[in-house]
Image (cartoon, rainbow, N blue to C red):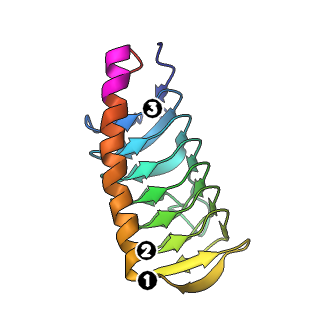
């Protein structure tokens, strides 16, 4: 099996990927990207930091087909909108994450859109298929859903515990995929 991932420097900045992270075949990681220990970037994700930086913390997983980008600096917003993703974050399949902050233990459901200036606090959840419009904040322990997303309810403790268990599952699953890909020549 031939590895078809792309890891490219751009504008003098190369992706910095921790040795323990799993980067699946088919991924495209470009520019000023930092990926932390035991993070997993699953098949066919695009992480493009060509106009600002992207940080992905330890044990965070970015599931298949997700696109992560950022927004460039502009007058009145000299920093632009980097995308800062904390530790132990779960990002579902086919999500679009753009110029936002996902704090430690945030959850972004599959098929969601998170737009510029948004913040999802720890243990906050954006439900599958939802769209968080610019500059919205999901507070700790809240569940938001819909297009555009709105507050639905607070999450019960078992739901928060399930999200945390999901992080451990993806760390182990990422290690298994990394090992298999290395043995078969995929990585």
Disc 2 designates what residue?
A: 159
Q: Are marks 2 and 1 in contact (CB under 8 Å)?
A: yes
Which quadrant of the rendered structure holds the C terminus? top left
Residue 143, above or below 78: below
Residue 110 percent coordinates (x, y)? 59, 56
Q: Does any portion of residue 38 appear in the rendered image?
A: yes
**Residue sitting nearer the eye, 14 or 118:** 118
Magenta segment range? 179-184
Kindly identify the residue that appears in the image at 44 percent across and 41 percent down.
Answer: 41
Q: Secondary structure at mark 2?
A: helix
Disc 3 designates what residue?
A: 24
Q: Secondary structure at mark 3?
A: loop
Disc 1 designates what residue?
A: 156
Residue 42 percent coordinates (x, y)? 47, 39
Q: Quadrant of residue 18?
A: top left
Kindly identify the residue that appears in the image at 38 percent across and 58 percent down.
Answer: 166
Kindly identify the residue that appears in the image at 54 percent across and 61 percent down.
Answer: 81
Magenta: main secondary structure: helix
Among all residues in the image, which is located at the extreme right?
147
Q: Compare marks 1 and 3 and give the one earlier in the sequence.
A: 3
The answer to whether 59 appears left or right of 117 in the picture is left
């Amino acid at each position: 099996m031939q590895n078809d991932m792309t890891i490219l420097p751009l504008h003098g900045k190369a992706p910095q990927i921790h040795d323990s992270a799993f980067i699946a075949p088919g991924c495209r990681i470009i520019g000023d990207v930092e990926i932390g220990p035991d993070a997993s970037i699953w098949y066919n994700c695009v992480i493009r930091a060509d106009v600002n930086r992207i940080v992905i913390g330890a044990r965070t997983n970015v599931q298949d087909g997700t696109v992560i980008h950022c927004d460039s600096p502009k007058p009145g917003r000299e920093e632009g909108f980097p995308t800062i993703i904390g530790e132990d974050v779960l990002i579902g399949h086919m999500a679009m994450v753009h110029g936002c902050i996902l704090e430690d233990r945030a959850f972004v459901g599959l098929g969601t859109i998170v737009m510029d200036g948004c913040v999802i606090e720890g243990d906050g959840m954006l439900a599958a298929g939802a769209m968080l419009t610019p500059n919205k904040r999901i507070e700790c322990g809240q569940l938001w859903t819909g297009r555009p997303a709105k507050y639905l309810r607070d999450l019960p403790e078992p739901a928060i515990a399930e999200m945390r268990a999901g992080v451990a599952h993806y760390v182990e699953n990422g290690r298994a995929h990394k090992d298999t890909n290395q043995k078969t020549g995929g990585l």
